Image (tube, helix red, strand yellow):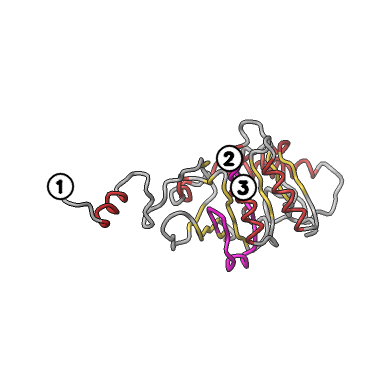
Amino acid sequence: MSPPITASSALLDALALPNVWRGRELAQAQEKTVATGHPALDAHLPGRGWPLGNLVEVLQAQAQQHVWQLVGPALATVMQQGEPAVLVHPPYQPFGPGLRALGVTPERLMCVHSEKPSARLWATEQAMRCADVCAVLAWLPQSRSEDLRRLHLCAQMGEKLLVVFRSLSSRQHSSPARLRLQVEGDEQLEVLILKRRGPPLLQTLVLRSQPQRLSALLAARKSRRSQLSAQPPVTVMDAPDVLDRSPSFAR
């Protein structure tokens, strides 16, 4: 006669199944992912990349800081099929030659601007519902947790890349985001993973720009300066990023 099956033995058998996620381990992503372009970051993410069809939240001290270096490689990947991406209220105008050097086609970037937070939220949701859009990057510093939850549910209807940028003060509030990052640093990306499916990651990840991409960006910037030098002088305010070329829009 075989020994009786106890609750503890049944639990151990269940934990032995390959598709069971254990809290002490990094989860195996059930959804589709796209590589971030930063191997050091991919190594600490479930599925080794940005989760598609889910909300990704990035917290920053300053709007637009390191945005393109962080998400540009993945954006270039998802745009390879020719579908457009939508930017909702970016604080700076994207710099076309620099983005092209990253592999992002600037002609397929659509920007939506609005002074009303509710309108930005509405635009983000509508962009996510559009079948022809492959990715949405939205700057929603005034969004609430319930607003993000609605966007998260909307994202789960497809396999789009959705990244929402908020301020560091949002860290104290709950978020439905599947992945939540805090990004800081001046000369390099310092990324702290605040939320993921897996055990906490206590150390900060330092992501350095890949040499070939940095060279391409600098070449694009030099080309742009050469074009401007041949034109009549104008007063231009410096932007904080090589991939952004004009002063911030009114927020």
Indicate which label's residue lies in the foreground, 2 or 1: 1
Q: Nearer the viewer, residue 248 or 116?
A: 116
x 64%, y 53%: residue = 150
x 67%, y 44%: residue = 128
Residue 202: x and y in percent read: 44, 63
Q: Find the magenta span and give its range.
A: 156-181
From the viewer's perspective, tell me whether residue 13 is left or right of residue 4.
Answer: right
Residue that protrudes farthest toward the top in the picture: 81
Q: CA distance from mark 2 to mark 3?
A: 9 Å
Q: Which residue is mark 2?
A: 159
User: Does the stretch in magenta take in 169?
Assistant: yes
From the viewer's perspective, tell me whether residue 104 is left or right of residue 89.
Answer: left
Q: Nearer the viewer, residue 193 or 224?
A: 193
Residue 75: x and y in percent read: 61, 41
Residue 66: x and y in percent read: 62, 54
Indicate which label's residue lies in the foreground, 1 or 3: 1
Upstream in sequence: badge 2 or badge 1: 1
Quarter of the rendering occupied by the C terminus: bottom right
Residue that protrudes farthest toward the left in the picture: 1
Q: Which residue is mark 1?
A: 2
Q: 10 Å neighbourhood of mark 3: few (<14), some, or many (≥20)? A: many
Residue 162, numbered label? 3
